[in-house]
Each structure stands twice: as C-alpha cells, then as structure tokens.
Image (cartoon, rainbow, N blue to C red):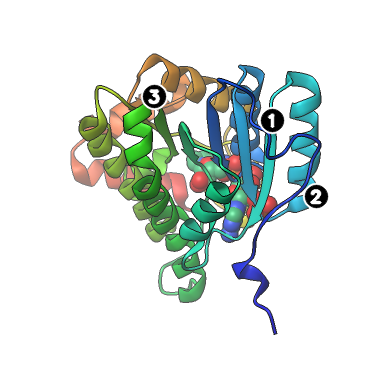
Amino acid sequence: MSDRSNDTTVLETESAGVPTPDAETALVTGASSGIGQELAHLFAANGSDVVLVARRGDRLREIAERFERRHGVSAMPVTADLAVEGAAGRLHETIAERRRTVDVLVNNAGFGVYGRFTETAADEEAAMRRLNIETPTRLAKLYAPEIKARGGGILNVASVAGVVPAPRAAVYGATKAYLLSFSEALAEELAPTAQVTALCPGETDTGFMRRGGMAASGVADGRLLDPAQVAQTGYHGFRNGDRVVVPGVRDKLRALLYRLLPRDLMMKASRQTWEP
Ligand SMILES: NC(=O)c1ccc[n+]([C@@H]2O[C@H](COP(=O)([O-])OP(=O)(O)OC[C@H]3O[C@@H](n4cnc5c(N)ncnc54)[C@H](OP(=O)(O)O)[C@@H]3O)[C@@H](O)[C@H]2O)c1
C-alpha cells in the first residue's frame, strides 16, 4: 500500500516548469489558504515566480492558475505533507528536478494544538513540531547556501505566541519561540547578503483557529486581524530589511509589554489571553 503522505507531486498548469526569465522565485509553504496564500499573492503580484506548497491540490491549482493569469508569472503548485519525516528533502529534490532555483523561502505552513498539556495528543504535537520546526529548519538548511550566494531571503512566519510562553498552547508557543530565535540568529549569520525576517502575527482570521481548537480560547475573543493585512505588513517588512515584524498596534504594544513586565506578571497576562 502506498503511503500518500510521502508523495510530493507537481501539479500541471499552463506555464509550470517554465520560469520567467530573470524573475526571482519565492517558495511559499502553506500557500493554499490564510496568511500563506496572501503572502504568495504579494510575491506574484510584484513579479516573482512562485512555488506553492500545501496538501490541498485543488486549491493550489486554482490559486496558481489565477496568479499566472493575473500577474503573468509562473506559479508551480506542489502537493506535499510537510509534517512527515523527510518532507523537506523530497520537496527540495522535486523542485531541483524541475530546474528551479529558490531565491526566497517563505516558511509559513503551521498549525497549533490547543489544550492543557496533560490532555493534548502527543502524536498531534509531534506532527506540529515537524511542521512548525523541523521542516522549516531543514528547508532553510537546504536553501540558505544558494540564497546567501544569490542575495535572496527567508521569511519565517512565527507568532506573538513565540514572544511569550503560552499556557494552554505550551508546545505551539514553544515551536514559535524556536522559529523566532532561529530567525534572528540566522539573520545575523546571513547578513549582509541575504535577508531573514520573522513575521509575528497576533490572532488572525484564518482556518488556524478552528483547526487548532483555539476558537474556544480567549485568543479568539478579541478582534481578529485580516490575513491580507498581516501578509502586506510582513511582505513590506521583509523587503525593507526588518528582522522581526509584528503587525498591528495592538500586538506591537502587547509584544513590548511582555518584554517590559516582570516575568510573573507577564505569565499572568499570557495565561488570561489563552484561557477559555
Ligand atoms: N491565524 C493566526 O491567528 C496566526 C497567528 C500567528 C501565527 N500564525 C501562523 O501563521 C501560519 C499560517 O497559518 P494561517 O493562520 O494562515 O492558517 P491556515 O489558513 O490554516 O493556513 C495554514 C496553511 O498551512 C498548510 N498546512 C497545514 N498543515 C500542513 C501540512 N501537514 N503540510 C503542508 N501544508 C500544511 C495549510 O494547507 P493544507 O491544509 O492545504 O495543507 C495552509 O495552507 C502558521 O504557521 C501559523 O502558526 C497564525
């Protein structure tokens, strides 16, 4: 029996496989919805060829065809489950077979597991760590040398949940703290030839909340950010050379406050945010 989760498949579209001469290529993971779809749109709208990766092929193909039609770029949809072992290596090979180079890596695919640590499913958390930590790190390992050589960049979608520990999303918060720390260190290593940015959104109106069960938590109570706006801020921050981007005044203040408060008060505030 074949293991479909190990498949990495390029879907055919009109111009897939034919890069636009002299255009940069942005590889965007989690491009089938939410913040990733909006980021991919901004790269395409600004003339970059894009490689779009996620599991839902029907959505990816439709998005790729729209980008090609509207923006005249090449958009290559690739279906892959990035939460399984070896996913990054297979994706890298698949893209290389198509003779694509990658100038910008956008590590966006991710999900959250919500609940008390004593009650959440260990296997689900392990898959989340592979998707939120292992795959982005491995993709960066594979692409950073060529990105540095050619002067491209890496945009990692972390979270405000990476700025402060997140009770009831302890492992999710830790995956984003990892990504934020990794991004800032890598930015220092790859400068000045390549750009590395960590985008740290607060609560945003995407499928993320439903999937992670977070709709029941305090984080879903307040005003949710618009994913197009979050992507826009992240894209401009990345292009401007910012290393950490927190979209929106509310979350900028929150991130600042978390840094200034004594640790016990910071934990109290965070707990209130995450409790149902
Ligand atoms: N929404 C928020 O409040 C919020 C706040 C801070 C940070 N973030 C971060 O933003 C990023 C994007 O999330 P979003 O809010 O835009 O949610 P979303 O709409 O659920 O998007 C998640 C994307 O990741 C893809 N994905 C999920 N599991 C995957 C897997 N196993 N293999 C490959 N692709 C997978 C999904 O595509 P398929 O289902 O088609 O595979 C989808 O394209 C995540 O890293 C999330 O942690 C979100």
Residue 199, visible in the rendered structure: no
Q: In the structure shown, which secondary structural element does the residue marked by tag 2 occupy?
A: helix
Task: Answer left or right for 166 relative to 219.
Answer: left
* Left-right relation of 155 to 144: right
Q: On screen, 109 above or below 46?
A: below
Whether residue 181 sits left or right of residue 199 in the image: it is left
Q: Respond yes or no on whether mark 2 lies under 8 Å from ligand 1.
A: no
Which badge, 1 or 3, comes first in the chain's sequence?
Answer: 1
Q: Is residue 16 or residue 172 the one in the foreground?
A: 16
Q: State the SS at label 1.
A: loop
The reply to whether callout 1 and callout 2 are in contact (CB within 8 Å) is no
Q: Quadrant of the N terminus?
A: bottom right
Q: Around disc 2, counting alpha carbons within 10 Å, would you say few (fewer than 14), some (14 to 19), or many (20 or more)?
A: few
Res. 27 visible in picture? yes
**Residue at the (27%, 42%) spot, across then down:** 181
Task: Report x, y in % for residue 17.
Answer: 68, 39
Image x and y of residue 242, in percent? 35, 20
Residue position for label 2: 58
Label 1, label 2: how many angstroms apart (C-alpha)? Answer: 17 Å
Q: Nearer the viewer, residue 92 or 37?
A: 92
How packed mark 3 is, by other alpha carbons closer than 10 Å (few <14, some 14-19, many 20 or more), is some
Numbered circle sitting on residue 74: 1
- The residue identified by callout 3 is 252
- The first of marks 1 and 2 along the sequence is 2
Residue 83 percent across, percent down from the top left: 52, 62
Type of amino acid under label 3? Lys
**Compared with residue 197, is residue 119 higher up or lower down, i.e. above or below?**
below
Mark 1 crowd level (few <14, some 14–19, many ≥20, 10 Å Cα) = many
Position of residue 273 measured from the top left corner of the image (x, y, whole percent)? 44, 44
Name which residue lies at 78% across and 46% down. 12
Q: CA distance from mark 1 to mark 3?
A: 35 Å
Residue type (three-letter) at the residue carrying disc 1? Ser
